[in-house]
């Protein structure tokens, strides 16, 4: 099955897959004054065939593979349209009503709309919508609340924390005195131990949230610990933001002083980040003004220059969907899908970190199977199943090897997959891993061909939403 970018209005019939000379219908994919999408695609094809071909191949790859990377999702074409719009031409340093360039009247309206929608989606009091990513959002928070050398406490990277939560590989662990908390032998957060560490180290900031933790997080308990130790609490909900917005995971908005998220994972939005504030928004910040004002200054001018207004518009589009009536169904589907994957993998004899999931994420512990994460990831990719190798608690293998695989259901849910279809994806994963084990780390060609055919069939039955029709 091939997948090409849509032909523009006015393109010859044969470019649209119609018989030569057939009347060309008007369609939604032609040039328009907002994105110039069709015209832009034609210009790209005419002026840079190399790049056009690469983009076409990537579109086909996404359509014809099962994306199960927990840190990804698929944005609606209307989100992509905003990201590719003429707003990308705009330089607009500052915030609505206080820019450092002229010509920003429309941009102001768009940014205000994005803020309004972010607040509506999460029940927040205020939002900063300019961070270029979740990492940028976290680093803005850190630099606003901490001075170099100050102590922060976050989940260790190899227990599922994020680089920006104090890893020595990141500014967050290099410029600050980062202390880490770990997990119980079962892979769970140990709140009593976190409290002990907070009392011992007296961090100025406690970070909760994770990149590889499949269970619910008790944000209220974290806030109790932060209050007892006079620390700020940052909740990074990048992985679970959709479940939070849909009410399927407890919300940190009024527990954490500050909540951050990336927008391209469970919000099905563009590359980007958000800073959200709840009941502490209007309280005094560490220096002058409110905490919300501190966060705005932390993004611009402290850590970023001009915002990407096209991305801000794309966030506004995605957040409107998140706050709307259809999102609850999608969020329920992704939670159900993850449950179905966890159940089926367990039935198939796989060991899961924590034994299951409360979120979209399932972590397979490969220890004892003779496989490592890198070999399993590569074999699955060769069949069209895209996952990522991941360390598991207590892992002693190098980061590029790992003893685990991390799976997620965001994109499967967007494709409309119900529990049964998600379980079929889990069976596919289990079949490939079983065949890989039987082949002592080499996937037999017949097993690959069978798995690849099942992937193609599933992708055709559950196409990416809005892309081909
Ligand atoms: N934080 C990284 C991950 O979870 O994979 C990228 O989003």
Image (spheres, grey):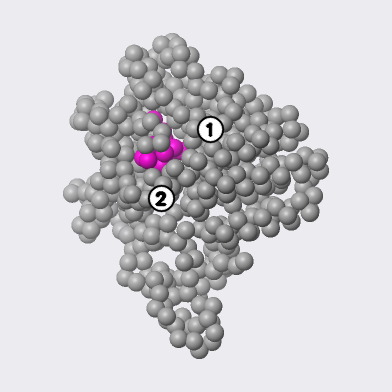
Residue 14, compared with residue 337, is above or below; it is: below
Residue linked to disc 2: 269
The answer to whether residue 414 is left or right of residue 403 is left
Task: Give the structural element (helix, strand or loop) at label 1.
Answer: loop
Residue 273, compared with residue 22, is above or below; it is: above
Residue linked to disc 1: 357
Q: Magenta stretch?
A: 235-246
Pick out the residue farthest to the bottom. Answer: 21
Whether residue 82 is visible, yes or no, is yes
Pick out the residue farthest to the left. Answer: 97
Whether residue 294 is visible, yes or no, is no
Viewer-proximal residue, 336 or 266?
Answer: 336
Residue at 44% over, 42% down: 332
Task: Indicate the position of residue 322 as horizontal and vertical percent values.
Answer: 36, 47
Residue at 39% over, 14% down: 202
Task: Indicate the position of residue 205 as horizontal and vertical percent values.
Answer: 38, 23
Viewer-proximal residue, 83 or 268?
Answer: 268
Residue 409, compared with residue 171, is above or below; it is: below
Task: Give the structural element (helix, strand or loop) at label 2.
Answer: loop
Quarter the N terminus occupies = bottom right
Task: Indicate the position of residue 175 as horizontal and vertical percent values.
Answer: 44, 27
Residue at 47% over, 63% down: 467
Magenta highlight on residue 242: yes
State if disc 2 and disc 1 touch (CB < 8 Å).
no
């Amino acid at each position: 099955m091939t997948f090409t970018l849509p032909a523009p209005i006015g393109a010859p019939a044969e470019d649209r897959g119609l018989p030569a000379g057939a009347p060309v219908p008007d369609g939604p994919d032609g040039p328009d004054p907002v994105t110039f999408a069709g015209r832009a695609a034609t210009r790209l094809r005419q002026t840079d065939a190399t790049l056009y071909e690469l983009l076409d191949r990537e579109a086909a790859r996404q359509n014809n593979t099962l994306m199960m990377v927990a840190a990804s999702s698929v944005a609606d074409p209307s989100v992509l349209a905003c990201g590719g719009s003429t707003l990308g031409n705009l330089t607009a340093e500052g915030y609505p009503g206080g820019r450092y360039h002229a010509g920003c009247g429309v941009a102001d309206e768009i940014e205000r709309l994005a803020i309004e929608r972010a607040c509506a989606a999460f029940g927040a009091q205020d939002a900063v919508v300019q961070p270029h990513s979740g990492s940028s959002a976290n680093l803005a928070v850190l630099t606003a609340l901490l001075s170099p050398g100050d102590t922060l406490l976050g989940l260790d990277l190899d227990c599922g924390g994020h680089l920006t939560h104090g890893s020595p590989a990141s500014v967050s662990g290099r410029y600050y005195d980062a202390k880490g908390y770990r997990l119980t032998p079962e892979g769970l957060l140990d709140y009593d131990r976190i409290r002990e560490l907070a009392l011992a180290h007296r961090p100025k900031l406690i970070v909760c949230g994770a990149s590889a933790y499949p269970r619910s997080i008790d944000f209220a308990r974290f806030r109790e610990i932060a209050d007892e130790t006079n620390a700020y609490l940052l909740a990074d909900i990048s992985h679970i933001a959709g479940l939070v917005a849909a009410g399927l995971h407890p919300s940190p908005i009024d527990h954490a002083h500050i909540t951050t998220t990336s927008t391209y994972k469970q919000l099905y939005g563009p590359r980007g980040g958000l800073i959200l504030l709840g009941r502490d928004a209007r309280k005094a910040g560490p220096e002058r003004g409110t905490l919300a004002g501190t966060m705005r200054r932390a993004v611009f001018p402290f850590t970023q220059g001009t915002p990407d207004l096209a991305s801000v518009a794309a966030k506004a589009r995605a957040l409107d969907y998140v706050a709307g009536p259809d999102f609850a169904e999608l969020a329920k589907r992704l939670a159900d899908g993850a449950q179905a994957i966890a159940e089926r993998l367990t039935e198939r004899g796989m060991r899961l970190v924590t034994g299951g999931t409360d979120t979209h994420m399932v972590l397979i512990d490969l220890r004892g199977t003779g496989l490592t994460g890198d070999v399993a990831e590569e074999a699955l990719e060769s069949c069209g199943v895209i996952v990522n190798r991941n360390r598991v608690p207590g892992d002693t293998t190098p980061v590029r090897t790992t003893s685990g695989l991390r799976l997620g259901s965001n994109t499967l849910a967007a494709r409309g997959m119900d529990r049964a279809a998600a379980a079929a994806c889990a069976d596919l994963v289990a079949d490939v891993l079983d065949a890989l084990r039987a082949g002592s780390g080499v996937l037999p060609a017949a097993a690959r061909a069978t798995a690849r055919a099942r992937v193609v069939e599933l992708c055709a039955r559950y196409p990416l939403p809005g892309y081909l029709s």
